[in-house]
Amino acid sequence: MEDDVLSHSDPSTGLPVGPRDARGAADFTAEQLLAAVLQSVDDDKAEDIVQIDLRGRSDVADYMVICSGRSSRQVAAISEKLADRLKQDFRISAKMEGKETGDWVLIDTGDVIVHVFRPEVRDFYQLEKMWLPAGAPRAANTAKA
């Protein structure tokens, strides 16, 4: 089955365009989903993993996770494995865009937006700078599963 594709993401915020899908009653919380995302990207050796709490700041998602892969191939592999694990563990068909090039993959799980970057692309867009509180050091928000 082919993955659903987002219409596009807003390059200024890095968030998908459009409202969050209504998922109704679920057997899991946003925090459980976040923990699974963090564990998955850590298991696949993603680097510089950062989680950002979006609750009260955006209606699109509750959390954002940003991480890096060392190459386009690793970025694609981290993204594919995450989507597979979410489908298996939570029955979520995550929407994904950017996997073809492997520079920046956006995965929309509904409650958690995940960005997997090559380091050069991540440095260019600097999403953390936009979403972390002013003056907050990036390392203080780094998640370790």
Image: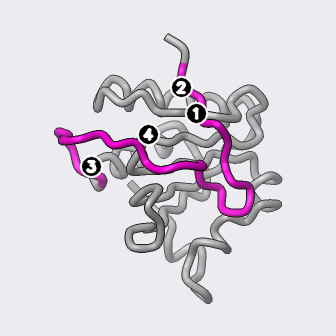
Residue tagged 2: 4
| For residue 11, above or below residue 109 | below
Q: Which residues are magenta?
A: 3-30
Residue at the spot of label 3: 32
Give me the C-alpha separation between circle 1 and circle 2: 7 Å
In the image: residue 44, left or right of residue 68: left
Q: Main secondary structure of the magenta part?
A: loop
Q: Position of residue 100 (x, y in %)?
A: 74, 26
> Which of marks 2 and 4 precedes in the sequence?
2
Q: Earlier in the sequence, mark 3 or mark 2?
A: 2
SS at badge 4: helix
> Pointer 1 and pointer 2: residues touching (CB < 8 Å)?
yes
User: Residue 96, labelled with which disc?
Assistant: 1
Q: Is residue 134 left or right of residue 103?
A: left
Foreground: disc 4 or disc 3: 3
Please give the name of the residue rendered at 51% of the width and 66% of the height, measured from the top-left corner: 142
Q: Are marks 3 and 1 in contact (CB under 8 Å)?
A: no
Give the percent coordinates (x, y) of residue 119. Answer: 76, 52
Residue furthest bottom as drawn:
135
Q: Secondary structure at mark 1?
A: strand
Q: Are marks 4 and 1 in contact (CB under 8 Å)?
A: no
Disc 3 or 1, which lies upstream in sequence? 3
Q: Residue at x 76, y 34 (%)?
A: 72
In the displayed structure, 19 sits above or below 143; it is above
Separation (CA) of disc 4 from disc 1: 16 Å
Depicted 104 relative to depicted 65: above or below? above
Tag shown at residue 40 = 4
